[in-house]
Image (tube, rainbow, N blue to C red):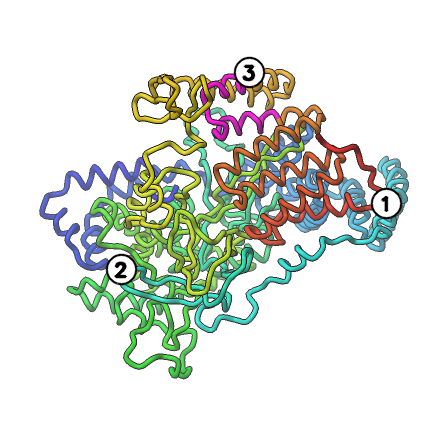
Amino acid sequence: MDLPVDEWKSYLLDKWALLPKSVQVTISTAETLSDIFLHSSSLLQPEDEVFLKQLSSSHLVDKDYDAPLFYREEGNKKFQEKEYTGAAVLYSKGVSHSRPNTEDMSLCYANRSAALFHLGQYEACLKDIVRADMHGYPERLRPKMMVRKTECLVNLGRLQEARQTISDLESSLAAKPTPVLSSYQILQRNVQRLKMKIQEKEALPESFPAALTNAFEAMALGEENKQISGASHSVSLCTDSLKGRHLVATKDILPGELLVKEDAFVSVLNPGEMPPSYHCLENKWDTRVTSGDLYCHRCLKHTLATVPCGGCSYAKYCSQECMQQAWEHYHSMECSLGSLLLTLGVFCHVALRMTLLARFEDVDRVVKILCDKAGSKDTCLPESKNLVKTFDYTNQGESKENSKVGEPPIPGCNVNGKYESNYNAVFSLLSHTEKHSPEHKFICAISVSALCRQLKAASLQAQTMGLKFPELKAVTPGLCADLTIWGVAMLRHMLQLQCNAQAITSICHTGSNESIVANSRQVRLATGVFPVVSLLNHSCSPNTSVSFTSTVATIRAAQRIAKGQEILHCYGPHESRMGVTERRQRLSSQYFFDCSCPACHAETLKAAAAPKWEAFCCNTCRVLMQGNDVLSCSNESCTESVSRGCLVSRLQGLQQQVHVAQKLLTNGKPEQAIQQLLRCREAAESFLSAEHTVLGEIEDGLAQAYATLGDWLKSAAHVQKSLQVVEARHGPSSIEIGHELFKLAQVLFNGLAVPEALSAIWKAEKILLVHCGPESDEVQELREMRSCLLNPSFIPAGPVV
């Protein structure tokens, strides 16, 4: 996904292996990015480009005007099965392949509006109705769409517009009577009912959480940090020879305090699992749902009502505005390169987009300076003192009074010492050129070279598209005269991304359709570059938490941070997710450093023992087992011992049985799932620690099953047991425990257990506010539940025991 597809990587590795030793040495010992790029790109042959083109052809990103009918019919099947989300996605695929101003496009939009209406997305439904009308929706079907429009307006409380739409409908029907009059009579009754419902809602007082939530809502960046854009005045930028650039607290910081809020300089939506070639399949059109079908390709907003690019079927947006901005800033160049970019991987795509977003004269100027200084190792490194001086396009002409005489500026800062989220800061990020393997640099350089050779053709096609579709303004700057300069910049960015790319994540809620218990998991949505967030150093036990809203990253303090203490972020390997050996190996291989954070140091001092969430226990006395190949009971009076291989085999068998139970639950057989899970729990308790992850999964499954049956008392009891396992692994203030408490609050709310539900809501909100902030979906839902519980008309149940 990040790097090129496996077939292209394997092809290039074979090509590398066949190169003369002298050529390999030349590339391996090259001291500048320019030399690496020029030597590698000179080896790209026509047959290599032919092979790459064959690989790219499996990604169907062009418009196919035969596809809309297929997708509309498939969407209709989903619609009849009341799978409205799936139907909406299929209609969107149809829109993406349709010609503008055709019946195909208008029908796809109209059908999607019907799916959105059933999903309660009334605003999106109205927009699709307008789009259907703009693209020539058939006059014979218009009364049906006007009925839907009226219902949306009533549901939204826009009664004046609803009355006008009804009047227009009546006029239309009077001019040309049709059988739709019966629908109009039904509409009149529904309008009256919805008016009464809206009046009832308006009469209810709006309820908000009390002091705790208001305090967090009021937290903002406050006074602008004069040294770092998008950062709180509670942090400052420092640098030294060991830590490099890093952030430090300028005052005592409380948990939940907002430290950094930064929009990505660049982001690219991860494509997800892409469809294979369709040479042997009945249909060449793919019906699977990927991230590209559900999120805006520019702002990453979740949407089922996508607006397609006019030139390709791949790029989709949440609005016409996002589509136009993407076209102006970068997509006019990327549009014809979609299949190639999917083949070359996300990192190559991000590298291209970074140079497209930068002013090309800056790319030209910086890389030329690097090239002119060939022979100095510093030409590859952002720490070069000369590099910082090459950019000052944001504050040209300003006073340099803030610069300290004799003190070199921190890389990425402008002449006034301010670090801003711009291309200057992006270019200053470490590329670790000398630490990447020669093979990796060769793969990146050849891939970038192949992309560069397609850019001129893409530029011409962008101009043609601009003439063909006047609404698409071809304002993207032209290519710099020397594509080598652009290629060197992109190669630098590709090498930077291994250490500086940030996974933009989203919280995904999963669970059976019938169950109110929602499992939360983090999914990788996109890859982005955040120059300010990149300043944070790693810790396996960080003192901050990061969350994302669209393309904006928010860093909050996860615990109290003392004045002068470093602000630390986790790069992925966390002490609650993996052992110290695996963490250090991952950090070393990807980020090129040996982690010596306090968590790693403390673990290395301990005796080699499995963490409780992976530990086995004695079958006789329930005490933890210890040892290597043969495990013995840690109770000195117990002589129990067993081979690790035997216990691992039992664990694997148990995990298979738990999977069977989860499948039963998914297939709507909760009673059978409960019996299976109870047998699994009995088996697990005989040899696994009480905090073992598998026991937590079993308790969570039981909670899901009982919730499906509506037995909220038992469901809550099992969620509370699952909570104990989660807390043992992740800690009482972790985001994981916040998600689990959110789940408990849902169960107790549905069980009408008011005091217990309010308590769970308060605990969950307190933790989730620290990690996610007041705008998160879970916090918003917790607020709604509390508002409902505190309503005088709410009927409570007895206590949950």
Which class describes the residues within 10 Å of circle 1: few (<14), some (14-19), or many (20+)? some
Q: Is residue 46 magenta?
A: no
- Horizontally, is 36 left or right of 456 in the view? left
Q: Which residue is mark 3?
A: 679
Residue 349 seen anywhere in this rendered image of the structure: yes
Q: Which residue is mark 1?
A: 197
- The image shows residue 644, relative to residue 46, as above or below, that is above
Residues at marks 2 and 3 touching, judged by CB atoms closer than 8 Å:
no
- The kind of residue tagged 1 is Lys
- The secondary structure making up most of the magenta span is helix
Which class describes the residues within 10 Å of circle 3: few (<14), some (14-19), or many (20+)? some
Query: On residue 484, which mark appears?
Result: 2
Judging depth in this view, the residue of 8 and 680 nearest the camera is 680
- The kind of residue tagged 3 is Arg
State the CA–CA distance, disc 1 to disc 3. 49 Å
Give the residue at x 56% y 52%.
Answer: 770
Element type where label 1 sits in the image: helix
Which is more N-terminal, label 3 or label 2? 2
Which is more N-terminal, label 2 or label 1? 1
Give the residue at x 70% y 23%.
Answer: 709
